[in-house]
Image: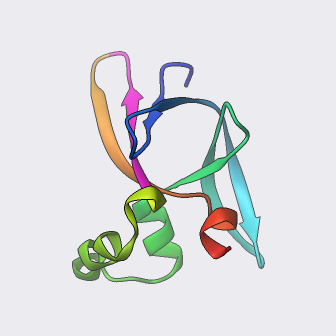
């Protein structure tokens, strides 16, 4: 986890320091916590919990503002994976 980095829309990067289950209205959503104590969610997990069909997820991504999404580099021992993630829900609701 210490090698997992979130790249923000402005090019800056933050390090993931923890993984937790975020609870909201009785629902649990896997989340990552960055070095600034901000919560980040994998886009596909958010879509699943909102019951958004896979063929509609591209539209979901396009509807987000540039500062509401980022990419996360996940480093495994044998590979590097890049996954889209979304802005913390608490900020997105404001």
**Which residue occupies the foreground of this view, 10 or 72?**
10
Name which residue lies at 33% across and 69% down. 61
Task: Kindly give the residue lying farthest to the top in the view shown.
Answer: 77
Q: Is residue 73 magenta?
A: yes
Q: Number of numbered discs present?
A: 0
Residue 16: quadrant of the picture: top right
Q: Residue 8's spot in the image, x, y percent?
A: 43, 42
Residue 74: quadrant of the picture: top left
Q: How is the image coloured?
A: rainbow
Main SS of the magenta part reads: strand
Q: Is residue 48 left or right of residue 41?
A: left
State the quadrant of the N terminus.
top right
Name which residue lies at 30% across and 34% down. 81
**Which residue occupies the foreground of this view, 93 or 58?**
93
Q: State whether residue 40 is above or below residue 93.
A: above
Q: Is residue 12 left or right of residue 26?
A: left
Residue 24: quadrant of the picture: bottom right
Q: State whether residue 13 is above or below residue 50.
A: above
Q: Residue 79's spot in the image, x, y percent?
A: 27, 23
Q: Which residues are magenta?
A: 69-77
Name which residue lies at 61% across and 58% down. 88
Q: Is residue 78 left or right of residue 88?
A: left
Q: Is residue 71 magenta?
A: yes
State the quadrant of the C terminus.
bottom right
Q: Residue 2's spot in the image, x, y percent?
A: 56, 20
Name which residue lies at 39% across and 46% down. 9
**Which residue occupies the foreground of this view, 64 or 77?**
64
């Amino acid at each position: 986890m210490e090698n997992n980095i979130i790249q923000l829309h402005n090019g800056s990067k933050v390090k993931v320091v923890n993984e937790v289950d975020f609870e909201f209205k009785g629902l649990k959503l896997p989340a990552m916590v960055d070095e600034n104590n901000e919560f980040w969610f994998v886009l596909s997990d958010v879509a699943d919990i909102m019951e958004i069909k896979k063929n509609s997820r591209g539209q979901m991504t396009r509807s987000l503002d540039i500062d509401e999404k980022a990419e996360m580099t996940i480093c495994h021992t044998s590979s590097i994976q890049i996954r889209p993630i979304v802005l913390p829900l608490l900020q997105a609701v404001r």
